Amino acid sequence: MVFLFIILLLLLNKINFMNSIVPSSLLTFCMTIVSCIAKESPQQESSASPTFVENDLNALEIATFAGGCFWCTEAIFLEIKGVKKVVSGYIGGTTLNPTYKEICTGTTGHAEAIQITFDPKEVAYEDLLEVFFGTHDPTTLNRQGADVGTQYRSAIFYHSEEQMKKAQDYITLIAKEKLYDREIVTKVTPASKFYAAEDYHQNYYNQNANQGYCQMVIAPKLEKLRHYYSSKLK
């Protein structure tokens, strides 16, 4: 098509030069069409880009953990190599679209949790489990330190049969190795609807590092992470 327009343009130019009888408006119209077609060509050539992005996203996986206050668990997993995104939120309850105020009553059935988007080529699900169990107490029922209530329970919400088996096998392993003095109470259940928490909860530690809770509770957990799991950090 472009080739034909170029030929037409050349012919018109030649006629115009020799006889001066072709209207300039017709010549301009032909040039405009050729220009528009030329601009469209690069867009057609780049149409493969969305497929690349989609394939990249399809290579990522989701893990969902509850281990007490999500400010703590979010701060920890944001530092893990291979983790692309961490969202704090609520899962495992019955109330639709729960708010933080409702969650804190302990009556919605939800747990404060984090949803982790990770690249399994960079970090294995078992590595995430190791960090999860190593940075909270899986032996205290509905409690982490001074945070008490069902919303602070220890739980793994699996997204596939493979994740379920890996979580159960890992719990069996650490129980056999007697890594804890008490029984592990972490529940392994299928992932249900996950509700992202309010915006001010997201990336909480990094935006409020000087706040009292962050200094007293989260900072020591991060120090432990950096000391014992340095090889897994970004």
Image (tube, helix red, strand yellow):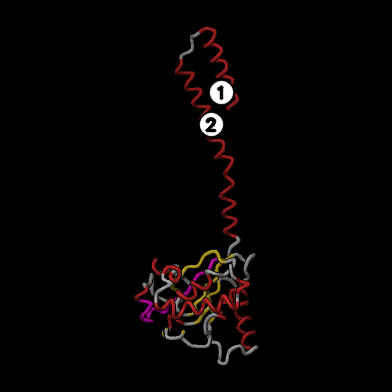
Range drawn in magenta: 102-117
The tally of labels here is 2
- Reading the image, the residue beneath label 2 is 37
- Quarter of the picture holding the C terminus: bottom right
Q: Secondary structure at mark 2?
A: helix
- Image height of 43 relative to 34, above or below: below
Q: Is residue 146 left or right of residue 168?
A: left
Magenta-colored stretch includes residue 214: no
Q: Are marks 2 and 1 in contact (CB under 8 Å)?
A: yes
- Image height of 28 relative to 64, above or below: above
Q: Secondary structure at mark 1?
A: helix
The picture places residue 27, in percent across and down from the top left corner, at: 49, 18
The picture places residue 156, in percent across and down from the top left corner, at: 53, 77
Relative depth, front residue between 193 and 36: 36
Farthest residue in the top direction?
A: 19
Q: Which mark is residue 5?
A: 1
